[in-house]
């Protein structure tokens, strides 16, 4: 072999070794990233409301047995139990409830009514005009449970029919943020799909994110409802990075219906990766009105427990 050819071949071998070494390092880094897992998997207890109403204590114990280490109480709150008692139950089951919910103040005896009647009262007492009163009450329970986040489950669709209504909602969210901030708590708002329906060319959800105080008002991003409303999860997590301290892991099937996490259309590894990057600290499994609640939370946990991102 001529010397020139020999040098060409051997230099190529050196370059190839260096190239392969770099590739190997890249693959190793990618493997480390790919092996990231959720350390804490939470459960939004609205998924098992029917079970909670029948056996409050047993349902919390079952959630812990499945493997959940965090829970988030539903819009129905602590179902009439004192916060001190609930904290004892959580401790006994090695559970935490780091994110609270603002629940309507209910007339005495409400929880003994049929379920449909209970929901009617909840909707009535959950109107915007009761928000500040309900927030003041919720702060007390949040302090007992050492919660640093307190979320409003929703303002209903009938309160998003005009821009004036939306602007009034925003004023109330900022006022609730002021109240919570005085107690070291970040107020938050949980979305549905109706906040993404444009009014006079304006998307209410965007306006809410733009015109609330980031230091006092956060948002709890519900993956199902964003997709259902025609929104893009990556877009919201990018444009409004830092605004979503918690998220609901809720899947959507190809018909637009609810599904157990991992059974639907949402790319949860990508969603989780992006959410954590922008500051999400708590993730909660949720499915609205599942046909088999216990099976649903088992399946969703099993998927997230093995998921890498």
Image: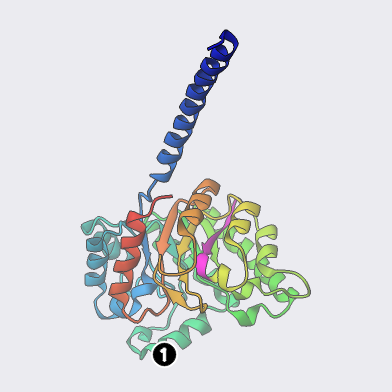
Give the x, y percent position of residue 70: 34, 58
Which of 80/161 is in front?
A: 161
Give the x, y percent position of residue 126: 52, 78
Looking at this view, name the residue that lies furthest to the front. 1
Residue drawn at 51 percent across, 66 percent down: 222
Asked whether 223 falls inside the magenta stretch, the response is yes
Residue drawn at 74 percent across, 75 percent down: 199
Give the x, y percent position of residue 165: 70, 76
Q: Main secondary structure of the magenta part?
A: strand
Give the x, y percent position of residue 47: 37, 73
Residue 28 lies in quadrant: top left
Tag 1 secondary structure:
helix
Q: Is residue 23 left or right of residue 217?
A: left
Please give the residue where the numbered disc 1 appears in the rendered image: 116
Q: Which residues are magenta?
A: 215-224
Measured along the vertical axis of the image, is residue 175 above or below residue 255? above
Which of 122/181 is in front?
A: 122
Q: Is residue 113 visible?
A: yes
């Amino acid at each position: 072999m001529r010397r020139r050819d020999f040098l060409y071949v051997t230099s190529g071998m050196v370059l190839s070794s260096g190239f392969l070494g770099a590739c190997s390092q890249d693959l190793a880094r990618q493997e480390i990233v790919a092996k990231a897992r959720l350390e804490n998997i939470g459960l939004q207890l609205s998924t098992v409301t029917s079970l909670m109403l029948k056996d409050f204590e047993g349902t919390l114990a079952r959630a812990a047995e499945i493997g959940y280490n965090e829970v988030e109480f539903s819009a129905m709150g602590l179902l009439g139990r004192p916060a001190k008692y609930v904290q004892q139950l959580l401790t006994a089951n090695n559970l935490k409830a780091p994110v609270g919910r603002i629940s309507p103040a209910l007339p005495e005896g409400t929880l003994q009514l049929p379920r449909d009647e209970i929901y009617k009262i909840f909707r009535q007492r959950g109107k915007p005009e009761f928000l500040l009163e309900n927030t003041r009450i919720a702060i007390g329970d949040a302090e007992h449970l050492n919660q640093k986040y307190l979320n409003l489950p929703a303002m209903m669709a009938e309160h998003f029919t005009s821009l004036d209504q939306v602007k009034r909602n925003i004023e109330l969210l900022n006022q609730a943020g002021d109240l919570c901030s005085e107690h070291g708590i970040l107020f938050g708002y949980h979305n549905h799909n109706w906040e993404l329906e444009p009014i006079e060319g304006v998307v209410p959800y965007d306006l809410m994110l733009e015109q609330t105080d980031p230091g006092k008002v956060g948002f709890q991003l519900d993956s199902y409802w964003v997709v259902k409303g025609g929104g893009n999860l990556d877009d919201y997590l990018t444009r409004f990075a830092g605004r979503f301290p918690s998220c609901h892991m809720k899947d959507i099937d190809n018909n637009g219906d609810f599904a157990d996490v991992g059974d639907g259309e949402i790319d949860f590894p990508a969603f989780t990766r992006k959410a954590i990057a922008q500051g999400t600290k708590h993730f909660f499994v949720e499915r609205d009105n599942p046909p088999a609640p216990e099976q649903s939370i088992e399946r969703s946990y099993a998927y997230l427990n093995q998921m890498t991102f």
